[in-house]
Image (tube, rainbow, N blue to C red):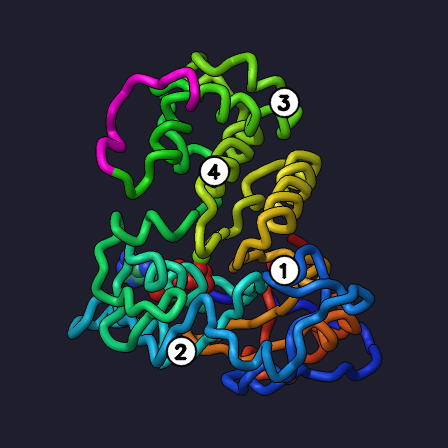
Amino acid sequence: MLEAPVKLPEGEDVDLGRPAGAEPAGRPAVACAPPAGRKPANGEDVVSEDAAADEAPMLEARQLVKRFNLGTVNEVLAVDGLDLKVAPGEYVCIIGSNGAGKSTLMGCISGTSPPDSGRTFIEGQDVTVWPEHRRASLIGRVFQDPLSGTCASMTIEENMALAFRRGRRRGFRRGVGRAERDIFRAALARLDLGLEDRLTDPVGLLSGGQRQSLTLLMATLVRPKLLLLDEHTAALDPKTAGLVMDLTCGLVEEERLTTLMITHNMQQAISFGHRLIMLHQGRIILDFDQQAKRRLTVRDLLRQFQGSAMGQISDRLVLG
Ligand SMILES: Nc1ncnc2c1ncn2[C@@H]1O[C@H](COP(=O)(O)OP(=O)(O)O)[C@@H](O)[C@H]1O
Ligand SMILES: [Mg+2]
């Protein structure tokens, strides 16, 4: 449900980017992480636009439809014939008011909420009917709730082992070998939270920020084809949220991860990633490439949104 509308100050018009559903107008420029195989515009071996255009998308959603409570008075069309192509290494921010269908879209992609119709492809492979656990080997996910991504009663290293063995046989073996432990210690050291010395502590002892950092690390421990972040900093205090965003940016950039990040924070949506899309009533209503995104300010964005199909904008969306 939409919250109280926000009054918008006067501002300059901005380019609205490509119309929703249109093909990308050229490749995204450099932001937090340049797309895979490409170098910054001032680099030496930039892939030609033609070559880039031939590249298969890492993710393609075709005509996805998802309804809940079918045939009841509470029936809701959460995702409404949505098309989306995401290039390898592209980092896409997704915004939209509560109930716009953002999380459901991620559920359709990850298999937790399979679509009623439409198809999902990852690196050209049709995964539409793959069960969630099979897709888990391709997809890393982090949710808003820091408690949801890890198991409190298991130790840090046991949690990491589960993530590390994702999609492999014997993934649920409980013991952790020395080789794995070394990998986990090295990965944890980059968090700079001292967790590398607490491998056998139960995760339940960690703070929310520590747990969310660990979840993010686990989601990327085995390089995922897709990283899905669903408001993963929204439940954290501003300082911790900033640290987790720094970590996100570092991991995405280093690994050139294809990433979809839902955020309710417009400034975050403008500052991070190569592309910004907005969902409304299960459809993409705005799609900004990097160039258009660079020119955006929160005020401009809000002003454009007021004139869009959305009509109103929530305080939460604006203020984060
Ligand atoms: N499991 C569910 N059962 C019934 N309705 C749902 C369920 N999940 C989401 N919805 C409905 O689908 C719509 C889209 O929800 P959601 O994808 O969670 O939106 P967002 O993440 O953009 O806030 C909303 O109307 C929501 O109430
Ligand atoms: Mg949501």
Query: CA gap, disc 3 to disc 4?
Result: 17 Å
Q: Amino acid at mark 3?
A: Leu
* Viewer can see residue 3: no
User: Quadrant of the rendered structure where residue 101 is?
Assistant: bottom left
Query: CA gap, disc 2 to disc 3?
Result: 40 Å
Please name whichever residue, 55 or 30, is drawn nearer the observer in this view of the structure: 55
> Which residues are drawn in magenta?
169-180
Residue at the far front in the pictured view:
45
Q: Amino acid at mark 1?
A: Asp
Position of residue 279 measured from the top left corner of the image (x, y, whole percent): 50, 72
User: Which residue lies under the disc numbered 1?
Assistant: 315
Position of residue 312 measured from the top left corner of the image (x, y, whole percent): 59, 74
Q: Nearer the viewer, mark 4 or mark 2?
A: 4
Task: Give the SS element for disc 1.
Answer: helix
The mark nearer the N terminus, 1 or 3, is 3
Disc 3 Cβ-to-ligand 2 distance below 8 Å: no
Query: CA gap, disc 2 to disc 1?
Result: 26 Å
Residue that appears at 50% across and 51% down = 229
Contact between labelled residues 4 and 1, with CB atoms less than 8 Å apart: no
User: Which residue lies under the disc numbered 4?
Assistant: 221
User: Which residue lies under the disc numbered 3?
Assistant: 193
Q: Amino acid at mark 2?
A: Leu
Residue that appears at 70% across and 35% down = 239
Residue that appears at 55% across and 72% down = 278
User: Which residue lies under the disc numbered 2?
Assistant: 82
